Image: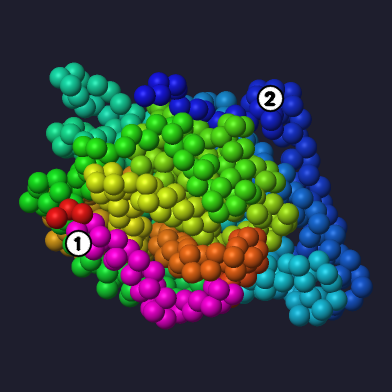
Amino acid sequence: MNNHPLPHWDLSAIYPALDSPEFEDGFARVTAQINALAELFDRHKIGRRAKIATNARTIKTFETIMTHYNAALEEEITLFSYIMSFVTTNSRNAAAQAKLSRLQQHNIIISKLGTRFVAWIGSLDVDALIAHSEVARAHEYALRRARIDATHQMSPPEEELAAELSVIGGTAWGRLHGNVSSQIMVEIELEGEQKRLPMSAARNLAYDANRTVRQRAYSAELDAWDANAVSLAAALNSIKGQVNTLTKRRGWDTPLASALHDSAIDRETLDAMMTAARDTYPAFRRYLRAKARALSLPRLAWYDIFAPLGEGSRVWEYDVARDFILTHFGTYSTGMQELARRAFDEHWIDAEPRSGKRDGAFCMWVRRGESRILSNYKPAYGGMSTLAHELGHAYHNLVKADRTCLQRDTPMTLAETASIFCETIVREAALREATGAERLAILEASLESSCQVVVDIASRFIFETRVFDGRQERELSVQELGAIMLDAQKETYGDGLDMEILHPFMWAVKPHYYSAERSFYNFPYMFGLLFGLGLYARYQADPHDFKRGYDELLSLTGMADAATLAARFGIEIRTPDFWRASLGVIEQDIERFEQEVK
């Protein structure tokens, strides 16, 4: 067994340290660039105007603005990611929190400039601009979306006020959730001793083979969430209230309508996908009942959802996972393999769970071709699979590296395309190598993940829809939020779980609810899983032809809507048929799992 400590990420290649002169110079350079961009906007009167004629002067102004706007966004992202690397791994780092707050004040300026830019594009003849400017043609999709966004803007003074208030409103409430949830300590009895664990470590006990440990961790977790529920409910109510208010002011019918636009899909596509998903609830319930039989239980409780199966299950120590991922990424391409090798060798990954660190996993863009990955690694197949998933995001970032900031602004629906694909590569490889209990464990881990992304995501979608509806009238209490959450879980999980032992505080667990800028941070994950599975099926059918177009598709995810990109692979996403085909792959695995359990 490998006893080496799990790695922490290294950002010293960007700045030596958070308190270094180089960082202060970088901060000053970014803020100067932002201020210079504001002056440029003022000089050229960028903002809502009467219709502007397309002439040589307009085209020159447009191209100048685009060049400087993209450059400022590029620099700011790197600085923001650098600071967030400290905040997300230690929310008690007061210096990092202060620098983040300081940067957010400058981000207000960027937000206002973005609003002015959209309003200005709404005043231009975009068709004529595209016809006469190469820069405009390269940014056609962004420009056409900006024209739509312009029709949903409030007056300039209102938009400026909204940007200023967001920092002390929705953004601040989101930070509160992140800080509070990452600092919660959970009291739990383990091995006869009373222990105090970070919430992330306590939640990882849901994967423990001992049911008593899982049950105690679950009970202790609920107690800890309950103790912090009032402040988290205040954060959720405030964020959803802000979104409801701005949604109405900006002329969107509902927050969902705005989220669909942000996700680059339409309601027809969402309904087609959700219809297909609902049709598979019975199959997922069969999987959950089969897992209960494998664990010799009459029914799974909530704390059994992630229970491991099989005494012979393989232990995936971090170094073992590294080698496995590198080997099987290489079966697709040397480019994908070398990206993963860089991530491991150059310490892009922070894998150790610890106090003050955010739970879960994510990948963030740092600079062109370079990302950082946060995980809370556990030595099981799920830990290895999650690592492959996040490395898929890093590969996606690499493929988009030569695009401008505005060109690579990928909606959530398409942001999971590469990650699901990479996760599926290692899953299929692990299944090919496995026999007996290990094969059962891998099938189960894959279905466990799919169940989360289809069934649990559906419950989160239902929950968020009802919270937005309820919040239009008044604030919702801790008890009401819990009741809405339980109802959503009952509707989706059904008799697959013990309905008396669910998770009423899942609304407090998931950070996805706590963003005023991004509502319905749930259904895009389902889209990503099913779209990724559909693409993987095409890869299996014709690997050579698939590889010729896949990287280009990834590079274009910020330059076309989902339906257009899907059509490149012969996929129609506005009817349930494609989604049923992708879900059919999962249903086949459920049948295989039931046979393995028998």
Question: Residue beneath label 1, please?
Answer: 285
Residue situated furthest right in the rendering: 56
Work out whether mark 1 precedes mark 2 in sequence or the reverse, and give the earlier one: 2
Q: Is residue 542 left or right of residue 529?
A: right
Magenta segment: does it hold 291?
no
Locate residue 381, reporting x and y percent: 36, 42
Task: State which quadrant residue 407 falls in.
Answer: bottom right
Which residue bears the numbered disc 2? 16
The answer to whether residue 361 is seen in the rendering is no
Relative to 286, is 105 above or below?
A: above
| Tag 2: amino acid | Pro
Q: Residue at x 77, y 50 (%)?
A: 71
Residue under the point 67% across and 70% down: 141
As displayed, is residue 80 above or below residue 43? above
Q: Nearer the viewer, mark 1 or mark 2?
A: 1
**Marks 1,2: beta carbons within 8 A:** no
Of helix, strand and loop, which one carries label 1? helix
Horizontal side of 462 relative to 109 (left or right) equals left
x%, y% of residue 402? 73, 54
Q: Which residues are magenta?
A: 566-595
Q: Is residue 295 visible?
A: yes
Q: Is residue 439 above or below residue 224?
A: below
Quadrant including the N terminus: top left
Assess disc 1: are there few (<14), some (14-19) or many (≥20) residues with their C-alpha within 10 Å of its C-alpha.
Answer: many
Going 63% across and 66% down the picture, which residue do you hit?
549
Q: Secondary structure at mark 2?
A: loop
Residue type at mark 1 is Arg
Residue at 44% over, 55% down: 424
Report the front residue among 143 and 47. 143
> Which x, y percent locates residue 320?
44, 34
What is the residue that sits farthest to the left in this orientation?
Answer: 298
When asked about the image quadrant of residue 216, the answer is: top left
